Amino acid sequence: MIDKTARIFVSGHRGMVGSALVRRLHAGGYANLLTRTHAELDLTDQRAVHACLDQEKPDYLFIAAAKVGGIQANNQYRAEFLYQNLMIEANLIHRAHLAGVQRLMFLASSCIYPRDAAQPITEDSLLTGPLEPTNEPYAIAKIAGIKLAESYNRQYGRQYVSVMPTNLYGPNDNYDLASSHVLPALMRKAHEAKQRGDAEMVVWGSGTPRREFLYVDDLADACVHLMQQGYDGPLVNIGCGQDVTIRELAEMVMDVVGCNAKIAFDASQPDGTPRKLLDVSRLAKLGWRASTPLREGIARAYAAAPFHS
Ligand code: GDP
């Protein structure tokens, strides 16, 4: 169990994942949370990160900070996705070890698995085949972070865990159409199509890829559950165990929003990985399962979306 007075550092607390972790930790009665805004601490700045961790000496560290984005942003800003994520994780994990942080959770992503991994994807499929080209730089950075954490465990007996969340959505998501993931993009597109009374709504790709979606508050609950349990396996998938096609997702979003437009598929945009469904049996054995149904989560996220007032 985590002591209620433990010093818990949540990096990236303004982002979708970090803010959900802060909500969950506050709700659990953890009062001693440490945070830094981007303006207060640039996580790619090695000296600044070292000074901060040496000074704060947290008992627990959640690495939710990352440069993230959807298929187009990952594909376009390949250098930044690789460089910034490598810097953030190298600075935090290495210095956490030197500052004596015993327990750390590194948030990676399901896109670290091979493009053609057997479905549902087990943790053992890491590094067994080539990656999806559209997000390879991001995946390489995250794989390096997983291996860095694992190496401190093996060499120095640390308990650093990496978790692989599936596609996430919820409050504080990115709704910018050029850089967002599919679910927030579809929510915004459906909302605007409804407002304008458009006959058509554009959905990228073929609509056939399958994706799994998890409400971000469920993810935060799973992360805190694993930290509380003292789970120290090198990695664990976090998902809900069910996926939908992009077409089904678009139809569900349009239904929640009340948009009656027709779907127009834009084949000039990439499909990315054909299917990405996580095997969540390791997580189930550890006593956790997702509780927010997709439709309900979409309705909650839509109600909280900044464009929806
Ligand atoms: P991925 O899971 O890494 O491929 O990233 P995304 O969440 O960005 O995209 C998932 C799938 O949704 C891909 O097949 C996209 O082509 C498709 N998609 C359909 N419409 C959109 C859209 O408006 N925005 C985004 N980002 N993806 C879309």
Image: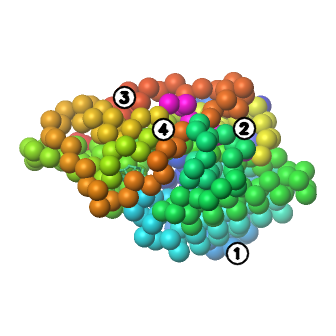
Asked if residue 213 lies in the magenta stretch, the reply is: no
Q: CA distance from mark 2 to mark 3?
A: 28 Å
- Bounds of the magenta span? 235-242
The image shows residue 141, relative to residue 163, as above or below, that is below
Which residue lies under the disc numbered 3?
A: 295
Q: Earlier in the sequence, mark 1 or mark 3?
A: 1
Give the SS element for disc 1.
Answer: helix
Q: Position of residue 212 (x, y in %)?
A: 48, 38
**Disc 1 packing (10 Å; few <14; some 14–19; many ≥20):** few
Ligand 1 within 8 Å of the CB at mark 2 = no
Label annotation for residue 28: none
Q: Earlier in the sequence, mark 1 or mark 2?
A: 1
- Report the mark closest to the observer, 1 or 2: 2
The image shows residue 153, relative to residue 124, as above or below, that is below
| Image quadrant occupied by the N terminus | top right
Q: CA distance from mark 4 to mark 2?
A: 24 Å
Give the SS element for disc 2.
Answer: helix
Colour treatment of the image: rainbow
Which residue lies under the disc numbered 2?
A: 227
Give the SS element for disc 4.
Answer: loop
Q: Earlier in the sequence, mark 2 or mark 3?
A: 2
**Disc 2 packing (10 Å; few <14; some 14–19; many ≥20):** many
Which residue lies under the disc numbered 1?
A: 47
Q: CA distance from mark 1 to mark 3?
A: 45 Å
Asked whether residue 17 appears in the rendered view, the answer is: yes
**Disc 3 packing (10 Å; few <14; some 14–19; many ≥20):** some
- Report the mark closest to the observer, 4 or 2: 4
